[in-house]
């Protein structure tokens, strides 16, 4: 091969190598430029996120709307009767011939078939046991027993058992109360338990009435006690004075002493039926609940912080003078006089003034800060 040809081939090789090197350099430059673009975009995005994270955004605090509980609608309480006290019958007598059952029959025969009658009467039981059956606090019953024992001891006599003990079979006759909204019809004391004091018997009647939800409608049956030494006129007077129109005296109803026979029970039932008609007790009553007051709206924390009056001592809003106090440690607090005339701080703690300065509710001493 001639030297001329070799020279030409060498030149071609140099050109080809130069082109390859140029191409590679151009690719490197393009790649570097692209990477620089991406880095710039990433840095810009990072700066945007940082700026967003450190920017304070004010979020409005909504004032809460008070939620008022709906007021229940009127409640209709149908006429219902709850008999408690003496059965006025001997053991084993037919309950269908008792005055509660005969009263119920009179009510149904008059067409009032929806009127409910519940019989909680208890045979041969003193008034102390009757209170226990009705659910009167045993401590209250115990106070009557102690009083009877003390009276007997002072008189140097032994008290009768009916005045100092209650029946031990209470658990056998006790049943769940479903009569607390009913009209009480009470007749007790025939066998004793009230120390022959009509005033005390009236108190015991009230103890049983207190176990009912309503005490605007009730009847006290005035059947005179087994003890004939009790003054019947004084008995009627004590009951009438205490219970007024709610007391049904057997004497005023034209009956002497209806008890222990079917005819007497029929008399009681009829007199009671007439009394309930007179007082309108067979009619249902409608009870309208008192509307619940609207709850106080609590000021949102953000608003309270922005409102200087929220952190002021009570009484400041009506022009009461603020008094600044300091304790032995140098702590400061402001008090003012509220509507009741008491000096209180922002937390409602009460401060009183004496010769040594001011005292808070915990006994700490404060001095006026001059």
Image (cartoon, rainbow, N blue to C red):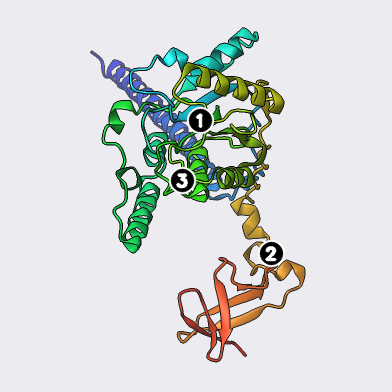
Between label 3 and label 2, give the one nearer the viewer: 3
Q: Residues within 10 Å of mark 1 (few under 14, many from 20)?
A: some
Q: Which is more toward the observer, 8 or 45?
A: 45
Q: Which residue is mark 2?
A: 309
Query: Residue 343 appears at what percent x and percent y?
Result: 62, 74
Task: Give the numbered dot on residue 180.
Answer: 1
Q: Residues within 10 Å of mark 2 (few under 14, many from 20)?
A: few
Task: Give the numbered dot on residue 229.
Answer: 3
Is 219 on the left-hand or right-hand side of 164?
right
Query: Residue 269 appears at what percent x and percent y?
Result: 56, 20
Is 57 on the left-hand or right-hand side of 150?
right
Query: In the image, what residue occupies the spot 61% across and 81% down?
Result: 324
Query: Residue 322 appears at what percent x and percent y?
Result: 68, 77
Numbered label tally: 3
Earlier-in-chain disc, 2 versus 1: 1
Query: Residue 109 appears at what percent x and percent y?
Result: 61, 8
Q: Is residue 74 visible?
A: no
Q: Considering only vertical position in the picture, is 150 above or below 81?
A: below
Q: Is residue 110 visible?
A: yes
Between the C-alphas of marks 3 and 1, the distance is 35 Å
Between the C-alphas of marks 2 and 1, the distance is 51 Å
Query: In the image, what residue occupies the spot 68% across and 22% down?
Result: 277
């Amino acid at each position: 091969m001639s030297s001329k040809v070799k020279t030409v081939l060498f030149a071609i090789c140099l050109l080809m190598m130069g082109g390859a090197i140029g191409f590679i350099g151009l690719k490197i430059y393009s790649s570097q430029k692209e990477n620089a673009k991406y880095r710039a975009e990433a840095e810009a995005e990072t700066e945007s996120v940082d700026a967003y994270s450190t920017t304070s955004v004010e979020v409005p605090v909504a004032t809460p709307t008070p939620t008022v509980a709906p007021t229940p609608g009127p409640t209709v309480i149908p006429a219902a009767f709850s008999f408690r006290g003496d059965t006025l019958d001997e053991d084993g007598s037919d309950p269908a011939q008792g005055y509660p059952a005969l009263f119920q029959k009179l009510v149904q025969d008059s067409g009032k078939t929806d009127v409910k009658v519940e019989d909680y009467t208890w045979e041969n039981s003193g008034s102390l046991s009757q209170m226990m059956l009705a659910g009167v606090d045993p401590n209250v019953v115990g106070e009557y027993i102690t009083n009877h024992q003390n009276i007997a001891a002072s008189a140097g006599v032994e008290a009768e058992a009916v005045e100092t003990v209650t029946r031990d079979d209470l658990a056998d006759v006790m049943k769940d109360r479903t009569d607390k909204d009913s009209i009480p019809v009470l007749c007790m004391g025939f066998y004793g338990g009230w120390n022959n004091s009509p005033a005390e018997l009236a108190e015991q009647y009230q103890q049983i009435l207190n176990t009912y939800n309503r005490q605007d409608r009730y009847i006290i049956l005035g059947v005179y006690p087994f003890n004939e030494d009790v003054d019947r006129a004084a008995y009627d007077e004590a009951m009438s004075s205490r219970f007024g129109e709610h007391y049904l005296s057997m004497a005023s109803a034209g009956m002497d002493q209806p008890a222990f026979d079917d005819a007497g029970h029929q008399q009681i039932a009829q007199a009671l039926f007439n009394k309930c008609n007179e007082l309108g007790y067979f009619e249902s009553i409608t009870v309208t609940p008192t509307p619940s007051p609207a709850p106080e709206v609590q000021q949102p924390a953000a608003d309270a912080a922005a409102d200087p009056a929220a952190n002021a001592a009570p009484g400041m809003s009506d022009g009461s003078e603020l008094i600044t106090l300091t304790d032995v440690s140098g702590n400061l607090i402001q008090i003012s006089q509220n509507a009741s005339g008491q000096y209180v701080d922002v937390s409602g703690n009460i401060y009183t003034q004496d010769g040594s300065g001011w005292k808070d509710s915990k006994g700490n001493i404060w001095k006026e800060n001059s």
